């Protein structure tokens, strides 16, 4: 299950006293963190997974007789419209600009159809928005798209729940000095530069380890990366892990690393979740030089900025932090305070909680 849906929203709502049920893709019906999970199976055929949920989910969710139905998948818009027209309180959660996603990421749609499909989806999204009791969005840009169609549009950014991390952070579980990277592993996210920088750093610190946690988009690049990591040694490439395991690994590392080569501005670039997760874990960060990061680093004093294309700079920054335990602790403490005050899920959740309260007090909103 998606971490935003379950570990952030569902768990937080349950802790506020809501009886939360999650209906989604899961191996079996379960009760987790006090939340009832109603499992829906996936189909091998991708098209079936896109079309059938709107027909299957109503039979799963209507018997629950919920006060609020909150859906996240744009494929469920028809289901949401059906519920809203039936007099139910429905909240649509928009994680990204689906119109743009259809054009750039939905490879199973023929190129010639992506443009028309994106315009149709954009039209349906906006018209459907007016039927719903509320809209939850992850960025100001997306909020602007929906506010004219639903005044009950609220911004709930996908920042990490800082209280899930150990208060101290950076406590080693072994004698090794561990550098951690979490997130998608690709060239645009600096995976090769991270390896090269770590290789140089390891020559000065043989006991160091690099943990890379995340998935690959390209099988060929994954094979090449794993072979290069094997040659360097002391590099663990673990693939995708449950979010609770990622939290534990981040909290036991000494340094987080974030190198990015995204050229276009985007929500993912401006607010990279891995950065806020590192800071929540109380560890300093070696981060590539970007204007937005420079502003944050000046305010938060949580790490060292480097030229992401220069492995020597990356190695030097890692060695600097390795040699200065007090600096690591100061930066980790400063970063944790910075993210708690500015970029924590606990602050964002207040907007979601207020939306639910408004809907329950005034179901027609």
Image (cartoon, grey):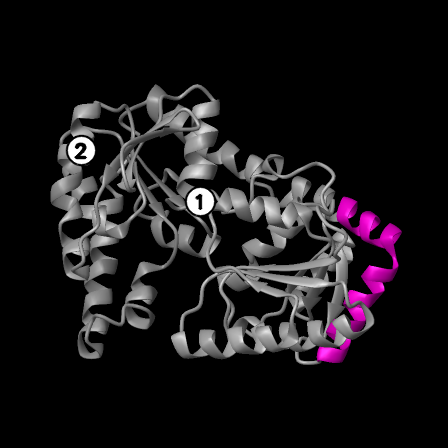
Indicate the position of residue 72 as horizontal and vertical percent values.
32, 45
- What element does badge 1 sit on? loop
170 left or right of 121 in image: right
Magenta span of residues: 311-334
Q: Would you say residue 259 is visible in this rendering?
A: yes
176 left or right of 25 in image: right
What numbered label is drawn on residue 347?
A: none
Q: Nearer the viewer, residue 186 or 271?
A: 186
Position of the N terminus by quadrant: top left
Give the class, few, some or many, for how many residues have Cα within 10 Å of label 2's Cα (few <14, many ≥20): some
254 left or right of 147 in image: right
Q: Nearer the viewer, residue 148 or 117?
A: 117
Q: CA distance from mark 2 to mark 1?
A: 21 Å
- What element does badge 2 sit on? helix
Position of the C terminus by quadrant: top left
Q: Which residue is mark 1?
A: 3
Residue 316 covered by magenta stretch: yes
Looking at the image, residue 331 lies above or below residue 188: above
Majority secondary structure of magenta residues? helix
Q: Residue at x 55, y 40 (%)?
A: 345
Quadrant position of residue 31: top left
Q: Residue at x 74, y 56 (%)?
A: 176
Q: Which residue is mark 2?
A: 60
Q: Residue at x 56, y 44 (%)?
A: 160
Indicate the position of residue 300 as horizontal and vertical percent values.
75, 52
């Amino acid at each position: 299950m998606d971490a935003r849906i379950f570990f952030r929203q569902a768990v937080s709502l349950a802790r506020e006293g809501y009886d939360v049920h999650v209906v989604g893709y899961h191996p079996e019906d379960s009760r987790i963190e006090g939340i009832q999970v109603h499992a829906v199976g996936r189909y091998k055929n991708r098209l079936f997974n896109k079309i059938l949920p709107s027909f299957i989910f109503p039979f799963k969710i209507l018997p629950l007789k919920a006060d609020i139905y909150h859906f996240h998948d744009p494929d469920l818009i028809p289901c949401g419209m059906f519920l809203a027209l039936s007099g139910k309180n429905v909240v649509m959660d928009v994680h990204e600009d689906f119109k743009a996603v259809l054009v750039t990421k939905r490879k199973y749609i023929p190129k010639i159809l992506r443009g028309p499909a994106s315009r149709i989806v954009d039209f349906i999204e906006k018209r459907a928005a007016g039927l719903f009791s509320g809209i939850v969005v992850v960025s100001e840009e997306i909020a602007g798209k929906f506010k004219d169609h639903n005044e009950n549009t609220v911004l709930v950014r996908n920042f990490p729940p800082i209280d899930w991390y150990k208060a101290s952070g950076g406590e080693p579980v072994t004698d090794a000095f561990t550098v951690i990277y979490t997130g998608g592993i690709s060239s645009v996210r600096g995976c090769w530069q991270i390896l090269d920088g770590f290789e140089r750093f390891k020559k000065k610190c043989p006991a160091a380890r690099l943990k890379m946690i995340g998935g690959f988009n390209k099988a060929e690049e994954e094979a090449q990366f794993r072979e290069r990591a094997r040659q360097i040694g002391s590099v663990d490439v673990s693939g995708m892990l449950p979010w609770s395991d990622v939290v534990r690994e981040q909290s036991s590392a000494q340094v987080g690393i974030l190198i990015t080569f995204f050229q276009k501005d985007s929500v993912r670039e401006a607010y990279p979740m891995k950065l806020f997760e590192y800071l929540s874990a109380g560890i300093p960060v070696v981060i590539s030089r970007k204007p937005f990061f420079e502003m944050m680093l000046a305010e938060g004093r949580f790490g060292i900025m480097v030229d992401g294309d220069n492995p020597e700079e990356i190695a030097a920054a890692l060695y600097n932090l390795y040699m200065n335990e007090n600096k690591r602790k100061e930066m980790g403490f400063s970063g944790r305070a910075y993210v708690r005050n500015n970029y924590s899920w606990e602050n964002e959740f207040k907007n979601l909680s207020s939306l639910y309260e408004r809907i329950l007090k005034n179901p027609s909103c």
